[in-house]
Amino acid sequence: SLHYQFQQGLDGVVTLERGTAYLLRTILSEGQGSTSTAFVTFREARWQAVAHQVVLFNTRQPGKHSEAEFMDWRFSPAPEAREILWYNASMPKTFLEKRQKLGLAVCYAGLVFWSAPIIFIQSIASIDAYEGVVPWLNDFLQSTGMYNVVTGYLPVLALLLLLLVLPHILMALAIRVEALKTKSSVQREVLIRNFWFQLATLVVTVLSCSMWKAFRVVVNRPSCIAEILGLTIPGVSRYFTTFVIARCGTSLPLVVTSPLLRLLWPPGQIWRKLKQEDCEHEPLYCFFAVEATDIAVVLAVGLIYAVIAPTVLPFCAVYFALASVAYQWMFRNVYESEFDCKGQFWFELFDCVMVGLMLGTLSLGGVMSTYTGFWDFHP
């Protein structure tokens, strides 16, 4: 009986391999515009396990596409139906490769020239820009004692508004331009890109230099990276400490109170809900690309200043303690499951942590070199 079952299993594998090869030849014979995604449903779980181990061979059709090697076919478990973006599921592979290169080019260009929109936003939010249009505004603010408050916080609020809109722009880029096919892949791409834009924002606003200028300096003198970080990073430790404190006092309370704000907006929402017999609300999902980026930025700041300015570490510890309580409550009582990423966000978060650790190590080396005169011997 065991031999019969084993022989039947081998016959099933051979049949599966032959059927797969025939299917691939049929798809390839239709041209390069065919879709790069296909779903196969098995009646038994054991054949699904067998399909994951099938080695594809003899997928080349004689006389057609003889110069091409089709060795990039892969079997993988299909994601859940709720995770798939069905309007992107049938996009062909050649189309996706071009779109993904375009999306990467747009993100790289945005990082290099990120200082331009920040300076533009801050110039629009400046009171001096409206002095010619509204001449009485300056005198009114000074007479009421609100001039310092408005001039100090208005550019910051405008910058925060830009950073709130940025993840949605990156998500539209990943879905509409790059045509990613699953929600988890979209969230992962937005997470890592949002993290880099957050770091670029800190560089532009705190270090008072554009990414393009810093890039040119590094290209001209690659050995001066540690020196630049060693001279600039320690001088703004107080700002980053305030940054972490602000995250504790504003970001986390907003996360907890967001369901209440969503309930109260638009005005009269509660009264309309009470009039109805059912008070069901639309499900609220966690925006991992934003929430995880906030946590990764604070962790990166803590790693950067762990040795240079360790006074920031207690505030980082307070942030993570409050974040643990806040997110545990949100995931237990508010957030609903939108998709199952199977822990794949760990890879992006690991990259963010390594970036913070690398910047901290380079900054520490730069600080030590400024005191030991290392750069005098290695200009």
Image (cartoon, grey):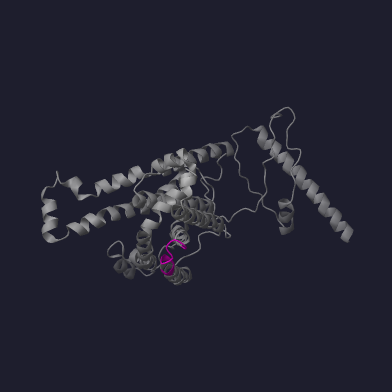
Q: Quadrant of residue 72?
A: top right
* Residue drawn at point x = 40 percent, y = 57 percent: 234
> Is any atom of residue 198 visible in this view?
no
State left or right for residue 21 relative to residue 212: right
Choose top left, top right, bottom left or bottom right for residue 48: bottom right
Q: Nearer the viewer, residue 148 or 313?
A: 313
Percent coordinates x, y for residue 174 in the rendering: 48, 46
Magenta stretch, main secondary structure class: loop
Q: How many marks?
A: 0
- Residue drawn at x 74%, y 53% is 50
Which quarter of the figure has residue 285?
Answer: bottom left
For residue 47, above or below residue 214:
below
The residue lying toward the viewer, choosing from 148 and 35, is 148
**The magenta stretch spans which residues?**
306-314
Estimate the x, y position of residue 374 in percent, counting from the top left: 48, 50
Quarter containing the N terminus: bottom right
In the image shown, does 48 or 252 lie closer to the viewer?
252
Residues 19 and 251: in front is 251
Task: Please say if 224 is above or below 161.
Answer: above
Q: Is residue 161 visible?
A: yes
* Residue at figure coordinates x 35%, y 52% from the top left: 206
The reply, left or right, for residue 55 in relation to residue 103 is: right
Q: Position of residue 252 (x, y in %)?
A: 39, 66
**The magenta stretch spans residue 357:** no
Where residue 339 sits in the image (x, y, percent)?
53, 59
